[in-house]
């Protein structure tokens, strides 16, 4: 029972870390590239044609970050 609680806590920690590492770049890339501000017409628009690019860039950035952290951090599964 105690081992199961430890495993659940570790899985939740992994879930939080993966979500943070992948969602933060997606949100920041969205704020940077999807929002289009027109100062002359005083309007704000969203560039929907870049949504796929932003999601792919955020996920790849997250995967590269996790891989580098595991390799540089000395992760040894066995």
Image (cartoon, rainbow, N blue to C red):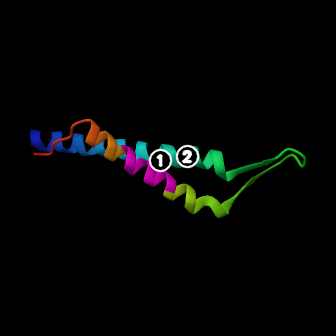
Is residue 62 or residue 46 the one in the foreground? 62
Q: Give the quadrant of the C terminus.
A: top left
Q: Residue at x 64, y 45 (%)?
A: 32
Q: Which residue is mark 2?
A: 27
Is residue 46 or residue 66 the one in the foreground? 66
Q: Are marks 1 and 2 in contact (CB under 8 Å)?
A: yes
Q: Position of residue 52 (x, y in %)?
A: 56, 62
Q: Which residue is mark 1?
A: 23
Per the model, the C-alpha gap separating discs 1 and 2 is 6 Å
Q: Position of residue 39 (x, y in %)?
A: 85, 44
Q: Main secondary structure of the magenta part?
A: helix
Mark 2, Cα crowd under 10 Å, few <14 / some 14-19 / many 20+, is some
Span colored in magenta: 57-65
Q: Quadrant of residue 53?
A: bottom right
Q: Residue furthest top?
A: 73
Q: Position of residue 47 (x, y in %)?
A: 70, 58
Q: Residue at x 25, y 46 (%)?
A: 11
Q: Give the quadrant of the N terminus.
A: top left
């Amino acid at each position: 029972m105690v081992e199961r609680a430890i495993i659940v806590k570790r899985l939740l920690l992994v879930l939080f870390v993966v979500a943070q590492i992948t969602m933060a770049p997606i949100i920041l890339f969205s704020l940077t590239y999807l929002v289009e501000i027109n100062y002359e017409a005083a309007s704000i628009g969203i560039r929907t044609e870049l949504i796929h690019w932003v999601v792919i860039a955020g996920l790849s950035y997250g995967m590269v970050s996790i891989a580098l952290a595991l390799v540089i951090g000395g992760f040894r599964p066995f």
